[in-house]
Image (spheres, helix red, strand yellow):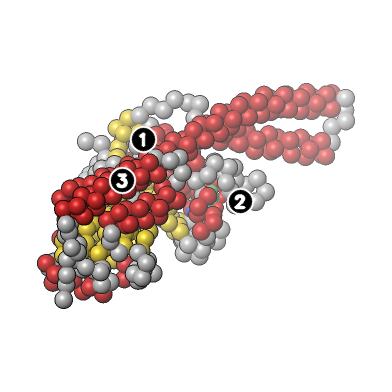
Amino acid sequence: MEHHLPRSPEAKLARRDAVLAAVTRASELLSEPRPWELLVAQALGELGAATRVSRTYIFEVERRDGVDLVSQRFEWCAVGVTPQIDNPSLQGMPLDNGFTRWGELLRAGQPVFGDIGDFPESERPILEVQEIKSILVQPIFEGSRWWGFMGFDACEAVHSWERVEVDTLRIAALLLGAAIHRQNRESLLRESQKLEALGRMASSVAHDLNNFLIVISGAKQLLQDEVRSSGLHSHEVDSYSSMIDQAVARANALTTRLLEFSKRRTSVPAIVSLPELLRNEEPLLRQAMRGRARLRIVDDCARRTIAPVRIDPTELAQVALNLVVNACDAMPSGGEIVIDVSTVTAPERPACTDQIPDGAWTLLRVIDEGHGMDAEVLAQAFEPFFTTKANNQGTGLGLSTVKRIVQAAGGHARVSSAPGRGTEFRIYLPAHR
Ligand SMILES: Nc1ncnc2c1ncn2[C@@H]1O[C@H](COP(=O)(O)OP(=O)(O)OP(=O)(O)O)[C@@H](O)[C@H]1O
Ligand SMILES: [Mg+2]
């Protein structure tokens, strides 16, 4: 038989005080300048002990193919309680599977709480397997995005949740969401500062290099003239001189790349139709491919339903060019490159692991059937100067330039790939109204 904990007024007050103290402590912890992932276990422990529940935990939500999947990320358990962190059914659990009510409440910023006995039939089996008698679940928001939830399970006895306790614990979930939000923004800022510093360095290297190249080219010309006029001209001299020319041309291309990366030209945004831009750029893209692969720009591109975007058209063309050249390089023995444009809104967008904020996006996809990337390359692909191309074939600045351009236009660049399975780049640009 279920029983309630004996709750004298004094006991109730003592518990409220303890919960308040634990939330205060959690707030101190989460404002420490350390990753929240390292602090959250201790915060969960303090909150669990204060509320006298059996478990406290954090779930993160991930939207995939229009369905919210939740996975347990952190857990604290009281002594003698069976942990659930390794319970496979709590990983990637779809919320529309009997828990639609939870999804609706949590997404709307509302808690779910009460005795399991009072919960709808569809929710009970999973909760009862974990021996939960009553539960409180508070949503976590990262800015305006529903990030997940923080939960409290009572397994030993039914736990009557008082309104004040529910509200106090809501503060704990709000604080955690704020810490996650702050840290995500800080890491974006650090990344952009790093890129900016690299950009300054790249541009100064490019300028110095350019000056040396002018000297080298000029001196080579003088030398050649000198050799000619002194009658020492030979076939060898011609071939040495063309080696110098080739090296100078390569170095010039490199400085152009460095300058593109460091963005010395000011961008001039315009309202651009992506399908139209691709049609105009198609000859250039084909030229860059030098017949190494087939290119297919899908028919949908011709449709007028694609929302325009606000971006510098030259820069957008550069994005397409970089992606197409990379795709070509990944297919040394040929294959097909598909460019596809669509307008997507958050719930229906493909590959929803992309974690793109809600809204309307114009999506450019560049898909190849090339050698793909392993996890290690994938993790670094967008890093400036990261390249797997041997013998100075690549500068490693292509994708970091893509990323810079896309981010400056308020967009997002994403990629999926696996060795031998080809690669798909997805460029999300805000749909212009
Ligand atoms: N479509 C793709 N398929 C497989 N690997 C890719 C693809 N696109 C990029 N990569 C990997 O990412 C790395 C970085 O790409 P990025 O365009 O930044 O530089 P790069 O192509 O090596 O040099 P550059 O663009 O200056 O010629 C590449 O060296 C390659 O390993
Ligand atoms: Mg490249």
Amino acid residing under circle 2: Lys
Say whether residue 379 is left or right of residue 306. right
- Dot 3 falls on a residue whose secondary structure is helix
Q: CA distance from mark 3 to mark 2?
A: 57 Å
**As displayed, is residue 210 above or below residue 63?**
above
Which residue corresponds to the image point at 53% horizontal and 44% vertical from the top-left?
A: 383
Residue that numbered label 3 is attached to? 21
Mark 1 or 3: in front is: 3
Residue 22 is situated, as x and y percent measured from the top left of the image, at: 32, 48
Q: Quadrant of the C terminus?
A: top left
Cβ of mark 2 under 8 Å from ligand 1: the answer is yes
List x then y, in percent, for residue 4.
Answer: 17, 66
Question: Residue 388 location in percent, x, y?
Answer: 60, 52
User: Residue at left 34%, top 69%?
Assistant: 81
**295 horizontally vs 47: left or right:** right
| The label number, if any, that marks residue 389 in the structure image | 2
**SS for dot 2:** loop
Residue 374 can be seen in this image: yes
Q: Which residue is mark 1?
A: 409
Q: In the rendered structure, which disc, 3 or 2, sits on the residue that comes first in sequence? A: 3
Res. 366 in view: no
Q: Residue 200's image quarter?
A: top right
Q: Earlier in the sequence, mark 1 or mark 3?
A: 3
Say few, some or many: other residues with alpha carbon within 10 Å of mark 1 (under 14 / 14 to 19 / 20 or more). some
The picture places residue 164, in percent across and down from the top left corner, at 17, 48
Could you tell me which residue is drawn at 80 percent across and 26 percent down? 223
